[in-house]
Amino acid sequence: MGRALCLPLLAGLLLAAAPPGDFRLEPLREAIISDARAADPAAMAFERTTTAIRRGPGINEKTVTVERWDGQRWTLLSVNGKAPSPTALKTFRKAISVNPVPGYHRLAALMAAASDISLDDEGRQVMKIPVLPAGSVRTDSADISQHLSGEAVIATTDGKPWVARLKVRAREDFKLNLLIKVTNFEQTSDYRLGPDGRPRLAAQSALSKGNLMGIAGGQTDEVTYAYR
């Protein structure tokens, strides 16, 4: 009799200790991928403001760039509060030609590469991506995805899981080209629920450090998105 009573009690304690929601990797991953695929960049319009600070020996430069995506095309609105110069426009056009439109939709490919799930110190579900798929993160001249890993923090609203934060970081030191070696790279993307209840990209921050022919330097970027 005592044994029979103990087994249901133990089962109840295990259920109480289990994390909320479905803790299996596959259904959680597929639910997020499906939702991300439904987020059409052509249905979005926003302005992106990027504050970039470059530091190095004798260098401390701050650049504030404002761009607009109208659902069909990009427009460079201003650089440091002024109309963009021909040089800035050329750099801008090169960047948008190789970089996809940012947004929650891009998580579909990223989360397909997730291979593990765990709980963090705050009890949140975290999906881990050991190596980012090709094309996930690009510089102006190179795809650095193979050098990065990622972690996605999962939130649940009304029983529906979504990615609240994605953090990617360098798995190793790597060369950007023959002259530049990257010694640290971290990028964090934060997502928020919009008025329609769907998640969308709200802000990003990035830190990169490296050296050029032995001279150390780095850059920080803070990006905000204002939707229309």
Image (tube, grey):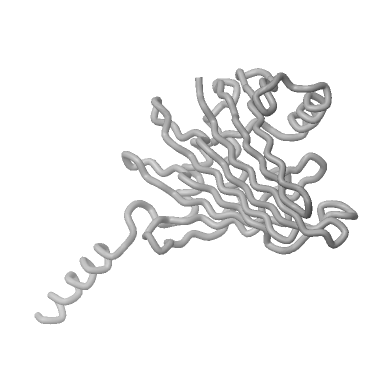
Q: Can you name the residue that lies furthest to the bottom here?
A: 2
- Residue 98 picture location, percent across and down: 77, 34
Q: Which residue lies furthest to the front in this view?
A: 58
* Residue 219: % across, % down: 69, 48
Q: For this rendering, which residue is in front, 221 or 115?
A: 221
Residue drawn at 45 percent across, 49 percent down: 28
Would you identify the image quadrant in which residue 24 lies? bottom left
Residue 74 visible (yes or no): no
Residue 26 visible within the image: yes
> Which residue does the image show at 35% across and 40% down from the upper left?
157
Q: In which quarter of the image is residue 66?
A: top right
Residue at 62 percent of width and 22 percent of height: 69
Q: In this view, does 177 lie to the left or right of 133?
A: right
Residue at the right extreme, as displayed: 178
- Judged left or right of residue 5, residue 138 is right
Q: How many marks?
A: 0
Query: Please, is residue 126 above or below residue 43 in the view?
Result: below
Q: Going 31% across and 39% down the picture, which residue do you hit?
A: 158
Does residue 36 appear left or right of residue 97 in this picture? left
Quadrant of image for the N terminus: bottom left
Q: Depth check: give the residue in front, 179 or 227.
A: 179
Image spot of residue 12 (x, y percent):
21, 66
Q: Where is residue 92 in the image (x, y as percent from the top left)?
A: 76, 28
